[in-house]
Amino acid sequence: MTVNAYYLPLQFFAAENEGKTEKATSKKREDARKKGQVAKSTELNTAVIIIGFCALMVLFGGYMLETIELNLARSIRVIPDVLSRNDNQYLLILLSEAIVNIVITCIPLWMGLFIMAFGISYVQVGYKPTFEPLQPKFSKMNPLTGIKKIISKDMLVTLVLALGKVTLLGTIIFNVIKSQIPIFLNFYDFTPAQVLINICSTIIRIGFFAGGAFTILAVVDYLYQKYKYEDSIKMTKQEVKEEYKNAEGDPQIKGKIRQKMREGSLKRMMQSVPQADVIITNPTHFAIAIQYEPNKNTAPIVVAKGVDYVAQKIKEKAKEHHIHIVENKPLARTLYYTVDIDKEIPQELYGAIAEVLALVYSLEDKKANRRRK
């Protein structure tokens, strides 16, 4: 039996964000924004412009039509004068004046539409202009990329929205015109101005209905664009780690820096141990070196302290320089947790430290007496 095999390039249907499961970081969002990647619905802009145009026509349409009518009447009245003069320059002046009047008349409409278009875009994406999307990219000319775009869910959504717009617009136009047919049939009894007003009213009515229908489609499109945007900027776990490294520094390097700082701090602290008067221990875990210089300090200070390994090193250093080591478990723990290095001991510990120093000084006096004898 012969089986016909057909090759189907399934990579066209592969997920572009395969492996990207993490939400985008703030830096990733900022970089995407700089590249012009934002969640924006052009359908929402269209809906707002349609509704805005109809609303502005309701507000300013009468004024605009009246002004244009006056300008046309004036232009018609000067036609005999233009023909009698046979002066081309005079004709150009009249035409320029008419054009300027029409432009001035339409300024409220144009300004209103501009503000609405800018406002809806600002609401969607904010204000941060970028020209990067306008830069030519040869990757966009890749035919495989074009085929992927054609055979994608984005195109399917675009097709559904386009069919929805055509269907809604056709239905709205049909029903509005159908309801206006009795009026249209009586146009022969209307003045030209009344005919124009009825036609404009019908167009505005179609515009409001179409704008409302487009708004529904625009909301659906915006939600989809938001979903697509969030999906497109997702990151892999490795990308999140790399970004964290770039922002905060390599953890291994930072660890080595901290280790070097600890080593330097320990070295400086060990250099202060020989100047201590006494080492207070608990005796296995804690070691605190105390120094008291009445002419220099108002109270004894902690020149070194440590726990476990560091405590052992402090005691070894103290033995090398014949510094007394006194065991006092509660005092050692209290000093370690409450007094920082190079800081004076608190007043509530004066009595306990005084007893220790008195013991040390008495031992030193006895040692000195033995030496004299």
Image: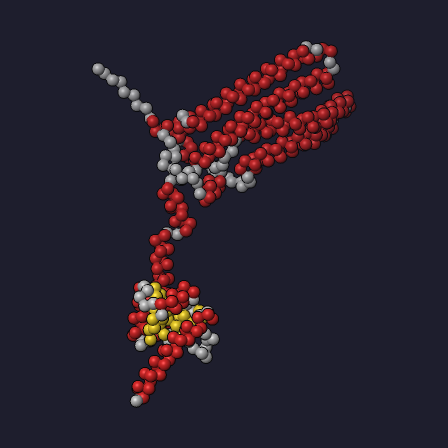
Image coordinates of residue 202 in percent, x first then y, are 65, 19
Name the residue located 27 percent from the left edge and 20 percent from the top edge: 5
Question: From what the image shows, is residue 102 above or below residue 316?
Answer: above
Corner quadrant of residue 340: bottom left
Front residue of 145/206: it is 206
Front residue of 362/173: it is 362
Q: In this view, does 170 lie to the left or right of 58?
A: left
Q: Quadrant of the C terminus?
A: bottom left
Question: From what the image shows, is residue 58 above or below residue 320?
Answer: above
Front residue of 88/303: it is 303
Name the residue located 41 percent from the left edge and 70 percent from the top edge: 302
Corner quadrant of residue 281: bottom left
Question: From what the image shows, is residue 1 above or below residue 17?
Answer: above
Q: Quadrant of the N terminus?
A: top left
Name the residue located 35 percent from the left edge and 56 percent from the top edge: 255
**Can see residue 205?**
yes
Name the residue located 37 percent from the left edge and 59 percent from the top edge: 258
Image coordinates of residue 291 in percent, x first then y, are 40, 74
